[in-house]
Image (cartoon, rainbow, N blue to C red):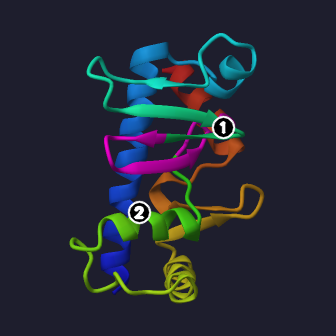
Amino acid sequence: MKEILLNLIRGRTEKVTLAVELLKEKFGDINFIAAKNTGQIPKKGFLDAAEIVSYNLHGRGCDVDFGGERIEFDFDYATENHTGFNVGWLKAFLNRHQADFKEIADLSMDNLQTLLVGLENDNRIKFDEEKNLYFLADDFRTQGELKARKTELALT
């Protein structure tokens, strides 16, 4: 069951990554929340010419609707990783993909949370207490790790 849950998390992560890529294609590599707050970009709009994929910037994050499939996420400019998730966002994603994840489709929020704790204990995901979000272990970066990586890249 844990592997199925990991596949669900990976699917959600891919959708968030796609959403961020579409935002960057439209507006450039900017701080979207700051740009929204200063009026540099609209709070709501479309990310495609056909006006199917819409976005709504809010608080620290964004909702992107891919024409019937909505994904919500928070921006994390400290680590440049926007793929964090909480149990509610994961459950919403699961509800939209029940056919693909039949084995876990009926899990309650509490049971889903229990499985997430198991994945964390197995070091497959990490929980960031400051952000109150989970991340895939391979995607989890702290501010210090990001600075070190940027310094390493700059030196090469």
- Kindly indicate the quadrant of the structure image that contains residue 76: top right
Q: Residue furthest left?
A: 99
User: At 58% across and 28% down in the image, what residue appears?
Assistant: 150
Say what amino acid the circle numbered 2 marks.
Phe
Give above or below for 12 relative to 20.
Answer: below
Quadrant of the rendering where the N terminus is positioned: bottom left
Q: Position of residue 87 (x, y in %)?
A: 56, 70
- Magenta stretch containing residue 16, yes or no? no
User: At 47% across and 71% down in the image, what residue appears?
Assistant: 91
Say what amino acid the circle numbered 1 marks.
His
Circle 2 is placed at which residue position? Answer: 93
N-terminal-most mark, 2 or 1: 1
Give above or below for 46 relative to 117.
Answer: above
Viewer-proximal residue, 21 or 47?
A: 47
Instruction: Determine crowd level at label 1: few under 14, some 14-19, many 20+ residues with C-alpha closer than 10 A.
Output: some
Circle 1 is placed at which residue position? Answer: 58
